[in-house]
Image (cartoon, helix red, strand yellow):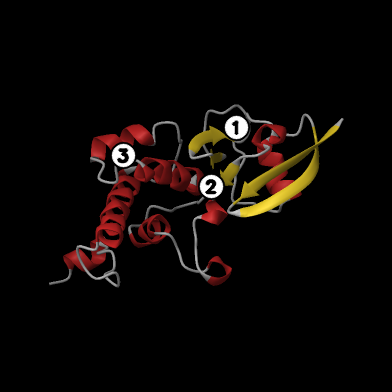
Amino acid sequence: MAVEISAAINGERVTRHVPDDQLLCDFLREGLGLLGTRVGCNEGVCGSCTVLVDGQQVRACLMLAAQVDGCDVLTVEGLATGPRRRELHPLQRAFIEYGAVQCGFCTSGLLIASKALLDAPPHPTAAEIREALEGNLCQCTGYGKVVEAVAAAARMMAILVDGRRGADETLESPAERATP
């Protein structure tokens, strides 16, 4: 049986008829073409399908699409801003600049989990970052660069929000720190 849902997906209102047993990850990927939400384990263990629903992290492989009726859903595609979403979020920029992306399969889940962390108190410690990312499995990075990238993004977001320095300041990448 099909049900009608209406949700804000990455800030845009979407109304669709979906099968009542369709998973959110399948709706996002197949129904809306949002391929950034990865499906790894289909058991809620790997974190690759993490999205935010009303600001809370959920595993899209464990949630039915019908459950997001009336909700705000944020996927990795919704992190970027500006015209045609071409301005990267500080997290996305930091992941690139700090080399926190390798094969990329887990990246969208790590980015969304990191955003959930930084939406709360925006000055997490390395231990808090590691704890926030515990539910996201990555076999490539070893997490060190991911933790550095999230910390750098937190600093950049604090600068942008608090206005402590100019908004045009960029993240200092490891390569730039090594340059005298």
Image location (x, y in percent) of residue 118: 35, 45
Image location (x, y in percent) of residue 147: 31, 45
Above or below — where is 91 with respect to 44? below
Lower sequence index among marks 1 and 2: 1
Q: Is residue 57 left or right of residue 121?
A: right
Residue density around tag 2, few if under 14, some if 14–19, many if 20 or more, within 10 Å: many
> Which one is nearer the viewer's eye here, 107 or 115?
115
Q: Residue at x 45, y 53 (%)?
A: 102
Above or below — where is 23 with respect to 29? above
- Mark 1 touches mark 3? (CB < 8 Å): no
- Helix, strand or loop at disc 3? helix
Q: Residue at x 47, y 45 (%)?
A: 112
Q: Amino acid at mark 3?
A: Ile
Q: Marks 2 and 3: which is nearer the front?
A: 3
Lower sequence index among marks 1 and 3: 1
Above or below — where is 178 with respect to 44? below
Q: Amino acid at mark 1?
A: Cys
Q: Residue at x 31, y 56 (%)?
A: 157
Q: Residue at x 63, y 33 (%)?
A: 61
- Mark 2 touches mark 3? (CB < 8 Å): no
Q: Amino acid at mark 2?
A: Phe
Residue bearing the label numbered 2: 105
Residue, far left: 180
Residue bearing the label numbered 3: 129
Residue, far front: 70
Q: Which numbered tag is attached to residue 41? A: 1
- Helix, strand or loop at disc 1? loop
- Helix, strand or loop at disc 2? loop
Q: CA distance from mark 2 to mark 3?
A: 20 Å
Q: Is residue 50 left or right of residue 124?
A: right
Lower sequence index among marks 2 and 3: 2
